[in-house]
Image: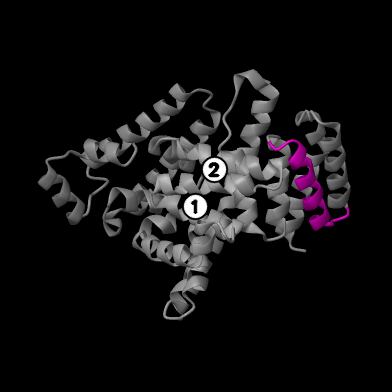
């Protein structure tokens, strides 16, 4: 095993050793499954640990501690897509004054650890995209579409840069899943993948329709919880989603430059460092924000910094975006509002 694996193993083992105290299980049977998972994990039987954690979550699907550890165990098995699904739910959880300081402290710590895992997921997403590009002339269109889904799921930045590809893979998925739409052959995972593609394509109504239909086919309370979470998240504003993305560390400096339409070649290394620092600071503040008002203040601070950098000439727009704003009679501030800032 690698040094990185051993370090992560010890970290998760430490979390599991105290988790039973902080998870405050309601169902004693859930606690029993968690204890089994802990024993399996100590014996480095990760698959058995995963199965026991899934059983615990069937009884207590809203237990963030169980879900966080499940995501870590899946991550250690290189099951990055499932790990992403579970860790994402934890990362989107809000600090709650009602749950007490101890819970909030643990949640902040988990969010930071999740953020640290994103680098590997992003790299794997890039690798998937390279596989797609290498084989995009292949007649196996469905296989290519699934590869693109995996790339976009693991690396959010790729979807911003390759938005036009979403229409292409949407059509491929819809064609392949016609029987599921007709109700004669429900394919759970592919349909949920399509719902995600709808979501990142800004087709919220279509995504909601798939999630609602998926609820008719759930097999346990954990599945129901996950799909309900996805459905509820659709109703968050673009602004809230952008803040979640920044907080989770999914939004990088390159994504920021792409979103703002900047001339990357004209940005100095020192200015790039300033953007990195700005996003890092915003992520840290969001992790500690306890109210919607505090999150709003972080957003306003980001906006103010962007406008200031543009006025100082530290952040140049590309000619295409500049002409677009001039033609529409819009200011940079108007544009930022359109982007959710």
Magenta region, residue range: 43-61
Depth check: give the residue in front, 190 or 18: 190
Task: Examine the structure image and report whether residue 165 is included in the region drawn in magenta.
Answer: no
At x 49% / y 52%, what residue is drawn?
Answer: 195
At x 62% / y 33%, what residue is drawn?
Answer: 108
At x 27% / y 46%, what residue is drawn?
Answer: 315
Q: Position of residue 26 (x, y in %)?
A: 79, 28
Q: Quadrant of residue 57?
A: top right
Q: Quadrant of residue 330?
A: top left
Q: Position of residue 284 (x, y in %)?
A: 52, 35
Q: Which residue is mark 1?
A: 195
At x 18% / y 38%, what residue is drawn?
Answer: 331
Depth check: give the residue in front, 26 or 4: 26
Q: Residues within 10 Å of mark 2 (few under 14, many from 20)?
A: many
Q: Which mark is residue 230?
A: 2
Q: Secondary structure at mark 1?
A: helix
Q: Secondary structure at mark 2?
A: helix
The answer to whether one can see residue 112 in this image is no
């Amino acid at each position: 095993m690698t040094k990185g694996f051993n370090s992560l193993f010890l970290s998760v083992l430490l979390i599991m050793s105290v988790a039973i105290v902080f998870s405050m299980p309601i169902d004693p049977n859930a606690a029993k499954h968690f204890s089994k998972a802990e024993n399996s994990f100590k014996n480095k039987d990760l698959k058995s640990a995963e199965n026991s954690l899934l059983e615990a979550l069937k009884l207590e699907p809203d237990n963030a501690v169980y879900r966080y550890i499940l995501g870590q165990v899946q991550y250690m098995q290189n099951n990055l897509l499932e790990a992403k699904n579970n860790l994402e739910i934890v990362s989107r959880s809000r600090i709650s004054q009602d749950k007490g300081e101890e819970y909030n402290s643990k949640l902040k710590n988990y969010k930071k650890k999740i953020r640290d895992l994103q680098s590997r997921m992003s790299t794997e997403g890039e690798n998937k995209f390279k596989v797609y590009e290498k084989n995009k002339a292949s007649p196996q269109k469905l296989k290519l579409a699934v590869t693109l889904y995996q790339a976009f799921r693991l690396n959010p930045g790729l979807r911003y840069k390759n938005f036009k590809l979403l229409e292409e893979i949407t059509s491929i998925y819809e064609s392949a899943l016609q029987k599921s739409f007709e109700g004669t052959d429900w394919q759970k995972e592919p349909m949920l993948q399509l719902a995600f593609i709808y979501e990142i394509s800004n087709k919220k109504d279509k995504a909601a329709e798939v999630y609602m239909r998926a609820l008719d086919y759930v097999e346990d309370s954990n599945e129901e919880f996950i799909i309900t979470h996805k459905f509820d998240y659709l109703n968050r504003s673009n602004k809230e989603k952008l803040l979640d993305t920044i907080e989770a560390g999914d939004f990088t400096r390159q994504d920021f430059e792409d979103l703002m339409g900047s001339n990357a070649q004209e940005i100095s290394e020192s200015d790039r460092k300033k953007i990195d620092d700005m996003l890092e600071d915003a992520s840290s503040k969001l992790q500690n924000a306890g109210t919607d008002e505090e999150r709003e203040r972080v957003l306003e601070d980001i906006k103010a910094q962007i406008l200031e950098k543009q006025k100082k000439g530290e952040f140049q727009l590309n000619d295409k975006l500049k002409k677009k704003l001039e033609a529409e009679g819009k200011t940079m501030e108007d544009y930022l509002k359109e982007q959710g800032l």
